Image (cartoon, rainbow, N blue to C red):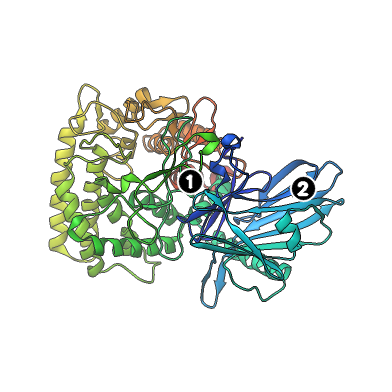
Amino acid sequence: MSTLDLGIVGNGTIGALVEADGRISWCCFPRFDGDPVFCSLLRSERSGVDDFGHFSIEVAGAMRTEQEYLLNTPMLVTRIYDESGGCVELTDFAPRYRQYGRIFCPMMLVRQVRRLAGRPRICVRLRPAVDYGRERMRASSGSNHVTYRGSGVTLRLTSDVPITAVLEETTFLLDTPLALILGPDETVNEGVVEISRRMAEETASYWRQWVRALAIPFEWQDAVIRAAISLKLNVFEDTGAIIAALTTSIPEAPGSGRNWDYRYCWIRDAYFVVNALNQLGATRIMERYLAFTLNIVAGAGDDGLRPMYGISGAEVPEEIEWPFLDGYRGMGPVRIGNQAYHQVQHDVYGAGILAAPHAFFDQRLVTRGDADLFSRLETLGHIAARVFDKPDAGLWELRGTTRVHTFSSVMCWAGCDRLARIASHIGLVDRAQHWRSTAAKMREVILERAWNPGMQSIAGSLEGDTLDASLLRLNDVGFLAADDPRFLGTVSAIERELRRGDFIYRYSQEDDFGVPKNAFLVCTFWYINALAAIGRKDEARELLESVLACRNRHGLLAEDIDPETREQWGNFVQTYSMVGVIDSASRLSKRWEEVY
């Protein structure tokens, strides 16, 4: 049975998910939103379809496995032990390092295989799919490679594994180190083992230098480092877009039908990623994402922003249900594209602006924000001021209803508030006064209409009477002070209504798919942050430890969690959740002087 006890390897062009036994069960080519050549993660054993859509290196008589990352890298090591005491070590990575003055991150997976003990026998099963699992790719061989072709995708495996053994999937004795390079249909002009060794060294060096430059908190360092690496793996190097997750259609809860395609760039989600990595000093991602966003803003003009975009900045494909994959554990549907692209979500204007202040205030940056950048951000501010009190689908992307969501209104306010601060900083006095006045009027309207005296809480919508976990961010964005009775009342109300055990639900009302069954992990991190802000730090630390214990063996989190079994659900690896790890750990960590 499939689980989310998976490792992730990637390089900013592609990302692969690796099972505990070393099987690659998910990877899209030629980039994150491409055809899932390896898609067995979304095909159940009872599907009745031939076994393909994976890349496995099987050990005859395998008895147990162990798995770990190379220190401070996304390079995954799997050791497989056979019944005779033999052991095979498999190292998986996607090359990423600086070459010729730029980042080299090709559409390529590298698998190194070596014997550690005994006389193990292995079998290579490379069975790529095409057209989202509709059929297997066609294979043809050369002198030391196999070419796999499908509609729109061509891959080449270059290896010193005997070609016949690959094509016929025969088992053979592993006595010397081997390497398998799967990538573009291009000739490899070096010995495969030698080039894979060099790529591995360069890739490990790149990641360790990147991690070394991070400003991490003293406590929970391993968790923060792994979260930071996983977030960086979701950044598309070519454009700076940030995807929400590598996968599509892993259900939020068993049989819920809440199966969505997350392989696109949400303006909101990307802002959270940028903000988290900025805390750690990884500012380059913010600079590149800002350029991506500004290109979109320039193209959108007065028509406004969509909630999400393709990783090239183009439209997101129309949402369809795909019949050739039956889904994670057989829990379909499998969806391609996302209908939410067409929704109205007003918080994106604030999120678009909030990704930019570092460009004006952070003196480490070589390219600083100026009046021209400010003017382009004002385009978003004008729309935010116009729509802040208008109905939308909200950040939870309700499909059947719209209302004036408080979080959307507050994010519009936050965007205008930041414009005032930026204008003041760069000496644009008139613009600072305009945006300060605009934000003040918006805040007055929101507070008057969102406060519910009967609930003694800010409501999830203006004039509403229900709660929404996004209200936990009212202090984070500067809308309410931590000691404001309205914020304290909102935290208390959410505790009463939305907490289940150690976890916080997004909301408790029935929506288009029924009542939510599992908790959305980032909401719990928001609750942890709120507890810290109002002075309940001991509770917050205890809760953070509890949530961190729910990570899989590699320190990774999906989108949702079952509060009772603590099993993870939803798309994986979820950037929202990994942002939560960084954000909460950074707020709650003690300094080393306080510990020793």
| Residue at the spot 18% in from the left edge and 42% down from the top edge | 443
Mark seen at residue 578:
1
Q: CA distance from mark 2 to mark 1?
A: 33 Å
At which x and y percent is residue 515?
A: 37, 26
> Which of the numbered marks, if any, corresponds to residue 59?
2
Q: Mark 1: which amino acid?
A: Met
In percent of the image, x 16 and y 44: which residue is there?
A: 442
Q: Is residue 216 visible?
A: no
Residue 392 in percent (x, y) is at 22, 41
Find numbered disc 2 in the image and state the secondary structure of the residue it sits on: strand
Q: Earlier in the sequence, mark 2 or mark 1?
A: 2
Residue ID at (23%, 66%): 426
Quarter of the image for the C terminus: give it. top right
- Foreground of the two, 463 or 296: 296
In the image: residue 247, left or right of residue 362: right
Q: Position of residue 434 (x, y in %)?
A: 13, 56
Residue at disc 1, secondary structure? helix
The answer to whether 120 is drawn above or below residue 191 in the figure is: above
Do residues under tags 2 and 1 come within 8 Å of each other at their CB atoms? no
Q: Quadrant of the N terminus?
A: top right
